[in-house]
Structures are given as C-alpha cells and as structure tokens.
Image (tube, rainbow, N blue to C red):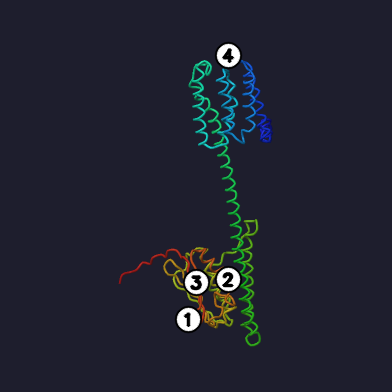
Amino acid sequence: MTFERVLLRVRAVPPLGADLLVAAGVGLFTASDAAVNDPEYRQADWFTWLLVAVSVLALIARRRGPMLVVTVTGAACAGWALYGHIGELLNLPVIVALYTVAVMGDRRRTVWTGAVAAVVSGAVALRVGHDVANPQGLPVLELVWPLVPLLLGEAVRTRRELLHEYEARAARAEQDREREAARRVHEERVRIARELHDIVAHTVTAMTVQAGVALDALDARPEISRKAMRQVRDSGKEAVRELRATVTVLRERDDEPTAPVPGIDRLRELVERFEGGEVELVMRQEGELGGLSPMAGLAVHRIVQEALTNVVRHSGARRAAVSVVRHDDRLIVEIADDGAAGGAGAGERPEGRDGFGLIGMRERAVAAGGGVEYGPVPGGGFLVRAWLPAGQRHERSETPS
C-alpha cells in the first residue's frame, strides 16, 4: 500500500514539476562527476560548467522538443569528451533525452535517432582516442550505449500503447454490452406491446360481436342470447389468462406458472368467438399441421386474430374465409373477405393507414422466418396472405397398385 501511495503521488505531479525534478537529479549526479576528474586529464573549468548547465537546463524542455534536447545534450556530451573529460555520469543527460525521444515518439523516429547517435558516438570515440573515450578498453561500447535508453523507452512506450488499446477495447466492449442490453429491452417492450394489442383488440371485438348477438336475441331466442353471453364470459377469461401470461415476463419471479402460448391448434376456438355476428365466417384446414414451432404457431394465431378483428371492425364485409394449408415445408395462411372495394380490409386500418395490427402481423411473420402480403382482390374484397416455415413433412409410404 505504501508503494502504491508513493506511485499515485508521483503521477499526480504536474509535467513541468516532474521535468524540474528530473533535471535537478540529473544535474546533481552530472555535476558531481564533472567536478572530479583524473589528475592526468583536464580539470573542470568555466567551459565544463557551461556544458553542465546547458545540458541540464535543456532537460526541462524534453517533453516539448525531445529531438532538440537530444541534439543539445548530445553535443554537450561530445564536447566533454573532446575537451578531455572522462566519466561514467557525464552522458546521463543525453541518456534521459534519448529515453524521452523513444517513449514519446514512434518506432521510425527511434530507429533513426539510434542510428545517428551510434554513428556520432563512434566518431567521437575515434577522434579522442582509446584512453579518453573508453578507459575500459572496449571501443565498441561507444557504439552501443546510445541504443540502451532508446530500447528502454521503446519498450515502455509499447507497453503504454498496449494498455491504452486494452482500455479502449474494454470501453468498446462495455458500450457494446450496453447497446445490446438496450436493444433487447426495446425488443421485449415491442413484443409485449404487440401481445397486449392483439389480446385487447381481439377480445373487445369478439365480446362486442357476441354482446350484439345476445342483445338482438334476448326477447325472441333467449337460448341464443345465453350462449352469446357465455361466449362473452369465456372470451373475458381467456383474455385475462393471456394478459397474465404476457405480463409475467415483466416480473422478477421466474417460478410463477404461465398459461400455454396460443398456437395453431386453437384456431377453431378463435374463429368461433367471432361467429354469430354480421360477418359469416368459414374456416378451412388442409395438410398436417402438427410439429409446427411454437413461434410459428403463435404467429399464425395472432395473424388470424388480427385479420378477423379488422374484418369485423372495419371491412363492412358480409362473409370472410380463413384458410390454413400446408404445402411441404411451407404453411400458407389466407384471410379473405368480400368487403367493398377501396374500403378497409382484413389487413388495413380506416382511411388506408397502416396501424399496429398490420405492423404486428408483418413482424410476427418475419420473426418466424416467413412474410405477409395483403391488398384488394379483383371484383371486390380484401386478402391477407402469410407464409411461414413448417419444417419437413414426414413422407407417406405408398403401396403400389
């Protein structure tokens, strides 16, 4: 914890303050080395301290002009060697400058700086001679030492770039997760709104039809009136069950039982709710309708439900027909009526405006892998036609004659 606190305090220092501290530390070591020289060589004088002052003060601007600082400190280091000074810490300012060039630049600049620095250092070593340039007797080190701070700075810069890239990737991933969560919430809201629209619109229409039948037959045929009112009661109960199943997904509890999803097996019951009104309904089913996916079955149920609701409420038709036919791996659903040409039909709203019902039919069909088309038919009337995938039908065995 102590090291982390110290590191945080160091990082909190402003850039200019950090540069001043670096210049002060480098100046302390460089000046101490320049002040003590071997007796056989030139001792420190005004020119020596001028080079110390210039190289140390130049480090204050190392962030703003790293290449200029490298040039100044490198010239000072070469000046000491040519002037007759030797020491292990006289090249400390140029080492810091070379590190700054690498850590604040790019790889191309690092390579060019290293090449020039190595050539200049080798040329100075050849000019001043073996003893002054390298008392250890290894002149090749004069070519190599400028590359060490450059490699260190390159490694630090590369690590920083990787850390920044990882942080950027993490931020992008978090944004993607937030967008995906928002998209799923939006889709779930749209789905719930579509379910509520289908349930409420269908139930109200069916109850209105049956209530009208009960009212017309109340005096003359009370048994029909009672049957119609029972249908109204059953429609209300069914709507309550479907609403409860739909709203359950908004709750946090997952252990509460839900009603089964309506499917193609309940189409007959669905059509019966509209019978007895002003529209005569006919239903036809052909082919094997079993094995349909729950999504496709629900789509068929809701498409027929919405189309019949629009027929009863808007079309002014006297007759309507529902057809569900399976052709191999496709299920064709058609709802046709004989409403007046140009009027609102099974798939339209009044005045020709697309409403939530038509949008819901299209979305359900597309989500199940199918589609919907609609429009008036020649001679009057309106047709809604939907197709959905029905899976592979089992081949029937045939006995040769």
The label number, if any, that marks residue 378 in the structure image:
1
- Alpha carbon distance from label 3 to label 4: 100 Å
Label 4 is placed on what type of residue?
A: Tyr
Ranked by sequence position, the earlier of labels 3 and 4 is 4
Displayed quadrant of residue 157: top right
What kind of element bears circle 2?
helix
Q: Position of residue 307 (x, y in %)?
A: 55, 74
Q: Residues within 10 Å of mark 3 (few under 14, many from 20)?
A: few
Q: Are marks 1 and 2 in contact (CB under 8 Å)?
A: no
Labels 1 & 4 near each other (Cβ < 8 A): no
Mark identifier at residue 373: 3
* Amino acid type, callout 2: Gly
CA–CA distance in space, label 1 to label 4? 114 Å
Give how far across and how far down residue 64 sits, in percent: 62, 36
The residue closer to the viewer here, 200 or 3, is: 3
Q: Which residue is mark 2?
A: 357
Residue bearing the label numbered 4: 41
